[in-house]
Structure formats: C-alpha cells, structure tokens
C-alpha cells in the first residue's frame, strides 16, 4: 500500500495536484476558523509566491527554472516552520483531533516541511538546486536575526517613550506595530479570546519570539489605542474584520471603539 502511494506521488503531476489540494484546504480552513487573521500586504505577496511555487515545483524541478524554484522552496520552508511554531499547542491537540479528521489539517505544514527538505536537500532532482535551497535558508536565518535585533531596538525606544511620560516616540515600522498590539495586531494563536486583533504581522511576531515574547508597552487597551491615534493619526485602527467566517460580533460592538 505504502509503495503504491509513493509510486503514485512520485509522478510530478500527481504531487503537484496533491500540493494544490492541501494548500487549498489550508486557505479555506483559515478563512473559516481565523487562525492567522488578515495578513499584511507583504505577507500576502510572499504567500502567493510560495504557495504557487509549492504547487508547481514538482513539474519544474528538472527544467531551467529549477534554481529559482529551489530558492523559493527555501523561503517556503521557513513559512511553514513559522506556521508550526505559531500554532503552538494545536500541534498536540491536532493528534487528538485526528479522530474527527480536522486534526490532519494541522499537520499539513509538517508534511510540506518534510517534503521540501526531502525534495530540495536530501534527494533533489538536480544536484545544484540544493545550493539555491541552502542559500535561501541562510538568507532567511539572517533576516530573522535582523528582525530580532530590530525588535530589541524598538523595546529600547518604547522604554524611552515611557520615560518621557508618553510624549516623545521614535516612530518607525516596529514601534508602530508595538503600539498597535492587541487591537490591530495579534501576537499569538488563541482560540478562546472572544474577538482578536484582525491583522497578522509575522515580522512583529518573530521579533517577540526572539525577545522572550516581551510586550514593552504594558498599558490598558484604551490607553494603548489613544496613544496609537495620537502618534499615528493617519493610520486605520479599526477594520472591517473579515478574519474568519466564525469571527464574533464582539469586535464590532466593543466599547473600545465608542
């Protein structure tokens, strides 16, 4: 049975169809259950490229596009690793939920991680493609380390902000994300929080992971919103939350927006 399955999916077209089906399942489930909420623009672009490449690379891995597909696969590997880490305890609950079938979907990122490593690092169709895959991994590691350093720098900026009595803020990409935590940007997966912040910003989340999950601005949500509107008056802070079909009306009706 296992040999028949391996033989079937050893054909590039069959593997491409399987990958496309699994990615479609991930997108549909996220649309319904709101695991990652509304991705920021740059994230949507990266996901579109990575997901499309994951579907097509089995067909292209022996073509002249092999170096490019392998490089994108290296980036995609980090995308799926990020998904696994972000889901946290759901990786364990998924084992229990396999009984009702839904748990299998939680392990789709795990499947892709194993597939990408096998197809690009261990048994690549073109040996030289391995180096492009490794180059992307090195680039991603460097990017992640830079994000952690940038978040740490933003922590220092927020500390100075607090010392100034919340009057002077070094406004940049990361401090905007920190001020917007908990009402614009969510920081972790949680299935029991009533309503959650609608935007998903992986750069901020990764920065937190590398800095002991520290939220340097420890103020109540109302104060946080007032500070955000003061220093980023042109930015949108409440969204037409279409994070998931199962989202709660609590988000729209919360007194925070009154």
Image (cartoon, rainbow, N blue to C red):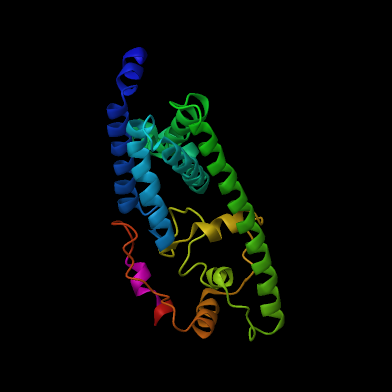
Can the viewer see residue 102 in this picture? no
Counting from the top left corner in percent of width and height, residue 223 is at 55, 80
Give the position of the C terminus as an image quadrant: bottom left
Residue at horizontal 32 percent and vertical 27 percent from the top: 12
The range drawn in magenta is 249-255
Residue at horizontal 32 percent and vertical 48 percent from the top: 27
Counting from the top left corner in percent of width and height, residue 19 is at 33, 35
Q: How many numbered discs sit on the rendered protein?
A: 0
> Which residue is at the front of the view, 83 or 246?
83
Q: In screen coordinates, is 157 left or right of 21?
A: right
Counting from the top left corner in percent of width and height, residue 63 is at 36, 32
190 magenta-colored: no
Q: In screen coordinates, is 206 left or right of 194?
A: right
Q: Does 251 sit above or below residue 203?
A: below
Counting from the top left corner in percent of width and height, residue 173 is at 55, 70
Name the image quarter holding residue 54.
top left
Residue at horizontal 36 percent and vertical 68 percent from the top: 250
Q: In screen coordinates, is 56 left or right of 151?
A: left
Name the image quarter holding residue 126.
top left
Q: In screen coordinates, is 13 left or right of 191?
A: left
> Which residue is at the front of the view, 170 or 217?
170
Residue at horizontal 64 percent and vertical 84 percent from the top: 168
Give the position of the N terminus as an image quadrant: top left
254 magenta-colored: yes
């Amino acid at each position: 049975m296992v040999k028949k399955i391996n033989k079937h999916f050893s054909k590039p077209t069959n593997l491409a169809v399987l990958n496309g089906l699994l990615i479609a399942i991930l997108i549909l489930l996220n649309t319904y259950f709101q695991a990652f909420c509304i991705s920021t623009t740059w994230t949507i672009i990266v996901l579109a490229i990575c997901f499309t490449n994951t579907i097509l690379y089995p067909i292209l891995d022996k073509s002249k596009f092999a170096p490019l597909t392998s490089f994108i696969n290296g980036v995609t590997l980090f995308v799926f690793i990020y998904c696994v880490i972000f889901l946290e305890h759901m990786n364990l609950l998924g084992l229990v939920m396999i009984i009702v079938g839904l748990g299998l979907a939680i392990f789709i990122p795990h499947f892709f991680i194993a597939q990408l490593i096998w197809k690009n690092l261990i048994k690549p169709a073109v040996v030289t493609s391995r180096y492009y895959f490794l180059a992307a991994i090195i680039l991603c590691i460097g990017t992640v380390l830079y994000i952690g350093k940038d978040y740490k720098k933003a922590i220092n900026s927020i500390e100075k902000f607090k010392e100034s009595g919340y009057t002077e803020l070094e406004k940049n990409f990361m401090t905007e994300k920190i001020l917007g935590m908990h009402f614009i940007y969510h920081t972790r997966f949680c299935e029991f929080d009533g309503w959650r912040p609608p935007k998903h910003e992986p750069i901020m989340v990764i920065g937190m992971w590398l800095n002991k999950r520290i939220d340097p601005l420890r103020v109540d949500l109302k104060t946080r919103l007032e500070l955000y509107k003061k220093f980023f008056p042109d930015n949108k802070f409440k969204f037409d939350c279409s994070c998931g079909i199962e989202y709660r009306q609590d988000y729209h009706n919360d007194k925070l927006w009154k």
